[in-house]
Amino acid sequence: MATGLSGRALIVGAGIAGLATALRFARSKWDVTVLDHGTHQPVPITGPDRHAARRLAALPHGLRYETRTSRVTGLHPDRFGVTVTFHDHEDEWFDVVVCAHPCCEAERLPGLCLENWSRDHIALLYRAVRDTGLPLSAAELLADAFDIHTDDRTAFAWWETTLKPHAIRRAFTHAR
């Protein structure tokens, strides 16, 4: 049985992938903060996401999280986590930042390669969802990675390796 991580997680975006991620992190005893800025369109749940939705709905866990309307204006990763700069209050430090929606300064981090979905304690969940079309599965696998692995680099590597084949299949299917 893996010990996994627990700590503070910032989820940016309260769409289906963001809330699913918040639910799974909260179930694993993480202190979760969710930021959101707008309305979200309903997302059809098909294929592997149906299985993920059944698993998420079966979790008897009250989702306790704080929702803010703050805007992230900067992400500053260090060896242990990410200092997040907000437009309306003091900087805060998080163990992990999950961008469930295109947000903040994540795309502008030096060395963040387009083929990567994660780097330096930051997961670009929205990019994995875009590449796979599997919002619930991507969210659940991300939280599973942190349940299984004891450090975030290994967790991110496992998440990307597990999810990447779905992106390849989707690209191949669309090319036909």
Image (spheres, rainbow, N blue to C red):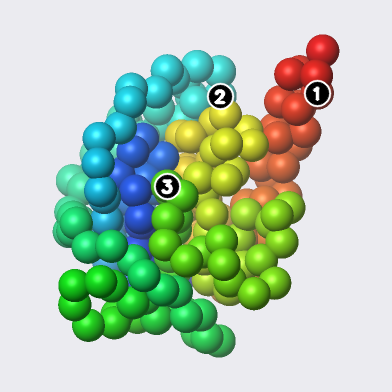
Q: Secondary structure beneath disc 2? A: helix
Residue ID for mark 3: 101
Q: Secondary structure beneath disc 1? A: helix
x and y, in percent, of residue 85 in the image: 33, 77
CA neighbours of label 3 inside 10 A, class few (<14), some (14 to 19), many (20+): many
Q: CA distance from mark 3 to mark 1?
A: 25 Å
Q: CA distance from mark 2 to mark 1?
A: 17 Å
Q: In terms of sequence position, does the residue under pointer 3 or pointer 1 come before the other? A: 3
Amino acid bearing label 3: His
Q: Foreground: 147 or 169? A: 169
- Position above or below: 134 against 92: above
Amino acid bearing label 2: Pro
**Residue 13, which numbered label?**
none
Residue ID for mark 2: 48
Report whether 84 appears left or right of 2: left
Report whether 14 appears left or right of 167: left
Residue ID for mark 1: 172
x and y, in percent, of residue 91 in the image: 29, 82
**Residue lying at 61% horizontally and 61% vertically, measured from the top left:** 118
**Residue lying at 25% horizontally and 71% vertically, measured from the top left:** 87
- Position above or below: 173 against 86: above
Q: CA distance from mark 3 to mark 2?
A: 21 Å
Amino acid bearing label 1: Phe
Q: Residue furthest bottom?
A: 79
Mark 2 touching mark 1, by CB under 8 A?
Answer: no
Please name which of the two marks, 3 or 2, marks the residue nearer to the observer: 3
Q: In terms of sequence position, does the residue under pointer 3 or pointer 2 come before the other? A: 2
x and y, in percent, of residue 3 in the image: 49, 68
Mark 3 touching mark 2, by CB under 8 A?
Answer: no
In the picture, the quarter occupied by the N terminus is bottom right
Q: Is residue 95 visible?
A: no
- Position above or below: 167 against 120: above
